[in-house]
Amino acid sequence: MQKIAMQTPLVEMDGDEMTRVLWRWIKEILIEPFVDLKTEYYDLGLENRNKTEDKVTCLAAEATKKYGVAVKCATITPNAQRVEEYGLKEMWKSPNGTIRRILDGTVFRSPIIVKGITPYVGGWKSPITIARHAYGDIYNAVEERCGKGEKAYLVICKDGKEIKRSLVHGFDNGAGIVQSVHNTEDSIKAFARSCFSFALEQKLPVWFGAKDTVSKIYDHRFKDIFNEIYSNEFKKDFETAAIYYMYTLIDDVVARVMRSEGGILWVCKNYDGDVMSDMVATAYGSLGLMSSVLVSPDNKYEYEAAHGTVTRHYYNHLKGEETSTNPIATIWAWTGALKKRGELDGNKTLSAFAERLEAASLKTVESGFMTGDLIPLFNAEGITPQKLSSKKFLEKIAENL
């Protein structure tokens, strides 16, 4: 057959461990036989990040600004054990955090609904989409250890002169730790506009929760900026679309979400979104059933799998053992990027292919063929689920495609 042409390349960011293996198989089995795939390739595997002193991550983010659409494999964020294992020059920062900082984007994560896999929360009838602020907080924090007798201050300077000083803590009775986080009003405004625009596009009500009763400056500023932008720029459009915006404390949002039927955009600060997106994904079935896209204020898109690199399966793979690793979230990263590339280029054939690939993936699971993680979750009358290895599962999807 004649392969589907692409006018503009995707930015392709390769990753680590088992997801790197799945990445290659997905391209070979599901995409390259049908699409004349054009990508600008960046190897974000940990060894290459170490070799380039993490410059490759910045180059990939800048390329995303240039081409507008990227697709990213899961990557390792190293800890002390990984530094030793890989012989790293230093404990490199999260590549996701670096890319989010450069693009100043918002991460939208939504469960992939599969017939036969019922959410653990019985009342959830529709997907809950998480909007995660992708800048600041602990991901751009400055941290130090403090010794006994030392004092930590928050110092504000302007033009080289100190204008404010606040005592954080005096460590008179023993050693401790200290952390400083920050955010910018421009980033919070971009976050708010991205969330409200996405909600209008998807016709979803917006729930935002923070802890302004405790964080009376930091979190309260988030609350105020969201209220200002909603009232001044989006309120009329929301009323026309018959959707609404609600702010309340995050603990109240969590309680409301558990009682809800879903069908909302849950807006979270950076750390909250990191945690809650995993909770929502698992409650709907699996971390392997979660789509994720980073959207910048100037509409640049980076699609990725929401889960990690599946280390345990990778070590089994290195031993020559077959693994049954769920590739669906990684497939959705590719299909999301291909659909958006097709949309931006006016290439309807490319977008239609990506939609067919998603449909074939869902059909494969719904007809009883799946990876091992989904079998305990699957409950469809008259169908006995069959466990397939990672590669056999991809080949079954190709057959349905």
Image (cartoon, helix red, strand yellow):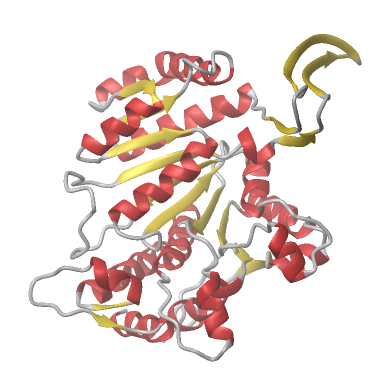
Total numbered labels placed on residues in the image? 0
The residue at the far right in this view is: 160
Q: Residue at x 26, y 73 (%)?
A: 375
Q: Residue at x 54, y 37 (%)?
A: 270
Quarter of the figure that contains the N terminus:
bottom left
Quarter of the figure that contains the C terminus:
bottom left
The answer to whether residue 22 shows anywhere in this view is no
The answer to whether residue 283 shows anywhere in this view is yes
In this rendered view, identify the residue nearer to me: 329 or 9: 329
Q: Residue at x 57, y 89 (%)?
A: 319
Classify 184 as above or below 398: above
In this rendered view, identify the residue nearer to me: 170 or 380: 170
Q: Position of residue 254 (x, y in %)?
A: 33, 33
The image quadrant of residue 42 is: bottom right
Q: Residue at x 56, y 63 (%)?
A: 74
Q: Position of residue 332 (x, y in %)?
A: 42, 63
Classify 314 as above or below 142: below
Q: Position of residue 195 (x, y in %)?
A: 44, 33
Classify 311 as above or below 306: below
Classify 78 as above or below 326: above
In this rendered view, identify the residue nearer to me: 85 or 236: 85
The residue at the far front in this view is: 173
The residue at the far bottom in this view is: 320
- Would you say 38 lies left or right of 362 here? right
The residue at the far top in this view is: 163
Q: Position of residue 303 (x, y in %)?
A: 51, 56
